[in-house]
Amino acid sequence: MPIPFNQRVLAFIELFQGRLHDFLEDGMRRGTRYLPMIQNVFRAEGLPLDLAYIPLVESAFKPNALSRAQAKGVWQFMRGTGTENGLRSDWYIDERSDPEKATVAAAKYLNTLARMFDGDWHLALASYNGGPGRVQRAQKASMAGKKPGGTDFWSLAANPRLLPRETRDYVPMILAAIVIARNPLQYGFNFEPLEPINYDTVTLTKPVDLRRVAEWTETPVADIQALNPELRRWTTPVRDGHYDLKVPRGMAEVIQARLSDAPPTDLAALKWYTVKSGETITTIARKLGVSRNDLAEANFVKVAAKLQTGAQLMVPHEATVLMASRTDLPVPVADSRPLVADAIVTAPSADTVKVIYRVKEGETLTSIAGVFRTSVSALRTWNHLPSNRIAAGARLTIYTARAN
């Protein structure tokens, strides 16, 4: 991809070498997990491999990165753009957070933008940030003036009235990141690559709670969620006849055996409600004490939809509503503050909700603490337990992260 070493690109190279050094280095380190996959997809689609470094600036390669404008994932798709490019987004799943699926969508979108601008990748990048309509309007405005100007990106960026500052900075910033990522040592960046993400896939025919999978594999639930960042709930999609869940390498057979032996009621704590004559989403939600929007979205109906008498509705409650993931809220890369993830919940707060959990045979406070990403001492404090001993069937009060 052509990269002009003009003053604007050089200024961002200097910025990345200075106060944004740690931001970029952290992103490059995290990106080592995803770059081989991204480059394989782009190679197959005939895209410049340099474009694989766009997420350095967009998200620092964080699958759950969420911008102030609600763009999400490694590629920072807005919901509408993601849907247009084949990404599913509903109450259960947001495929913008799946690096592999989002990369396929990004390749499709970048190819579309390249065709719109006759293969000019600088204009395509500007469109990726500001939208193709805005860039096209800027081109028309540039040509319509008393002294018609150029329609290439650098000509448009020279006139602050044509493009917003964010878009004017975006393209040289991406190009500067590409220059450094090509030769990090040359520019003062030194990091150890991360281990690739290895996993097996299990096809689920029934909804399963991620915490159950964590128990079966003796794996922290955070690790299960990290393998499946597209999942927005503890429970896999309730109405999907087939769902491919990523699990730790070597654990597929263990999970398959557990799935065969366990009754459906032990796989996920689901509640169902039978619609009575004349009831609506609003009246049922009020009756059950749940959000009407959650109730509607969890059942793929509109709030105002007419319900059939006898229909079965899945009732969203704490055991299904809680998100297993934490959302990373990125700051603009022009800001030197570090990216901050939500803190691990250790005590009740406005950002937590209460769960009543029934202890199962063989569980210990240690295993339960691992599943909910809390500590044994927190469990004992919340439940006034005199020791670490706990009996099957006991009910524990647990505070965990609130769903967004």
Image: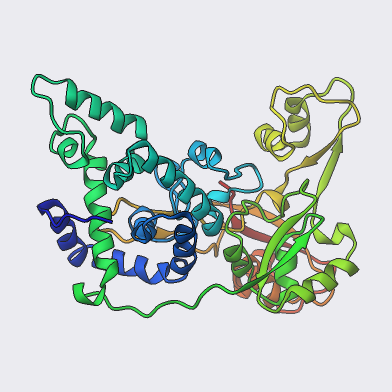
Colouring style: rainbow
Please say if 52 is above or below 70: below
Count of marks placed on residues:
0
Kindly identify the residue that appears in the image at 69 percent across and 65 percent down. 383
- Horizontally, residue 172 falls left or right of residue 130, namely left
Q: Front-most of 78 and 86?
A: 86
Q: Quadrant of the N terminus?
A: bottom left
**Residue found 41% across the figure and 69% down from its top:** 30
Along the viewing direction, whichever of 207 and 387 lies nearer the viewer: 207
Q: Position of residue 282 (x, y in %)?
A: 72, 26
In the drawing, does residue 41 fall left or right of residue 149?
right
Relative depth, front residue between 372 and 239 = 239
The location of residue 211, given as percent across then percent down, is 71, 64
The residue at the point 33 percent across, 52 percent down is: 331
Q: Nearer the viewer, residue 266 or 43?
A: 43
Residue 384 appears in the picture as rendered: yes
Q: Specify whether 159 is left or right of 291.
A: left
Q: Is residue 334 visible?
A: no
Residue 389 in which image quadrant: bottom right
Q: Position of residue 309 (x, y in %)?
A: 89, 26
103 left or right of 366?
left
User: Residue 404's spot in the image, x, y percent?
Assistant: 55, 46
> Is 361 located above or below residue 38 in the figure?
below
